Amino acid sequence: MVEVKTPRVKYIYLDVVGFTHNRTVETQVKIISALNDIVRGCLTDLFPEIDVIYIPVGDGICISLLDSTEAYDDHITIAEEIIRRICSLYNPSVKRSCRFQVRIGINENVDNIITDINDNRNVCGSGVNYAQRIMNFGDSNHILVGRSVYDSLVPRDKYSKAFRRYIGKAKHNTDIELYQYIGGIVADLNRDPPSAFNTPSERILSEYAAYYIANLLRNSKFIEKIIEEKSHYVYALGVQMAYLAEDLLGHSKETRLSPYDNRMPKTPNNTLQEQLEFFCGLTWEVCIDLHQAKVESKLWNSYPDCFEEGSTGTFVFVSEKGRQKLENEWPEIYKEFSTQ
């Protein structure tokens, strides 16, 4: 009977994002060859003595580290270096079609070392399976880790604030706990939340939404005065602010050869009060239709937490979360409007 070895294995599971999209077979071969060279180079340069099994997985590689090094965070170090070399060293040196990015899942577990059908060493167990499932939640340049990796790293000063927790649905609708690595100094590491965990309130503001919210903040005194005096003007106010946002967005994209024409209807002096009166003069049905098309469908449905709720203030009063999202996600727009 063959003795089965059961060491504690660290897994770095990675694949190429969008591997086949708009790429010829020849380009795919070049990318896999480049990825193999980069991965081998990282291991050779960083941990030349470590015992490792490379498992090809179609458009990626599973790196299985079989013994520990003096570095408790060797798996994170390798993952970061792979992303750095791809984005900073390899991609700038090749034509666009050969450039690529990877997503990485890291896990560790006591698993089995086996001999596969090709008489090569291989691994078998839940650790490698979970590494792949963890990776599948990631986007380009994400590093996601399992609970076992998190537990071993988070007590360290270097990693005490380096992770963001998520709960995902894995195979057979079971929950899987994973953590996004957001630390380190590698500029190309993707620290944005994985799209798999996006909810409407977590979506990045569109540029149109950013200008709409900025308009509300800049014109807050005008809006408050109108709502206090005539609360039923709230829908006309929303439409007015939407037109202002569209014009700001349009002017931000115009060029000398392609100027932008304002969509805001012209009034004698183009004041806020005159614009509002124009929209209030529309029939109720037309105003509601415009509000639905420009405000509710594009803003409220996507970013409900960015606006204060209320019978008279919906859509025209910005919540604290909305203000923070504008400042964090569109700092230049926030700075421009907050200083006016």
Image (cartoon, rainbow, N blue to C red):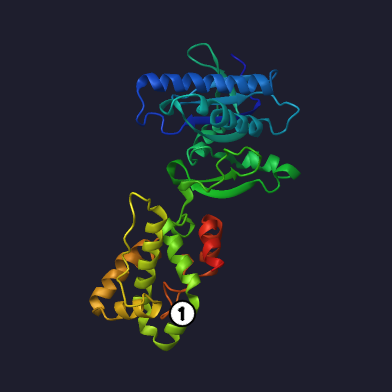
Residue kind at label 1, given as amino acid type: Phe
Residue at (72% x, 33% y) in the render: 72
**Residue 262 visible in this rendered orientation of the protein:** yes
Q: Residue furthest front?
A: 256
Find residue 101 and report its horizontal and vertical position in percent.
49, 32
Report which quarter residue 148 is drawn in: top right
Residue 261: image x %, image y %?
31, 60
Give x and y (percent) for residue 151: 67, 43
Residue 327 is drawn in which quadrant? bottom right
Q: In the picture shown, does residue 327 fall above or below 77?
A: below
**In this figure, which residue is indicated by the disc labeled 1?**
222
Q: Secondary structure at mark 1?
A: helix
- The residue at the point 53 percent across, 36 percent down is 130
Picture layout, residue 157 above or below residue 318: above
Q: Is residue 96 above or below residue 286?
A: above
Image location of residue 243, percent across then percent down: 35, 67
Q: Residues within 10 Å of mark 1 (few under 14, many from 20)?
A: few
Q: Quadrant of the N terminus?
A: top right
Left or right: residue 337 versus residue 274 is right
Q: Residue at x 60, y 28 (%)?
A: 111
Position of 106 with respect to 257 (left or right) is right
Tell me where residue 106 sits by quadrant.
top right
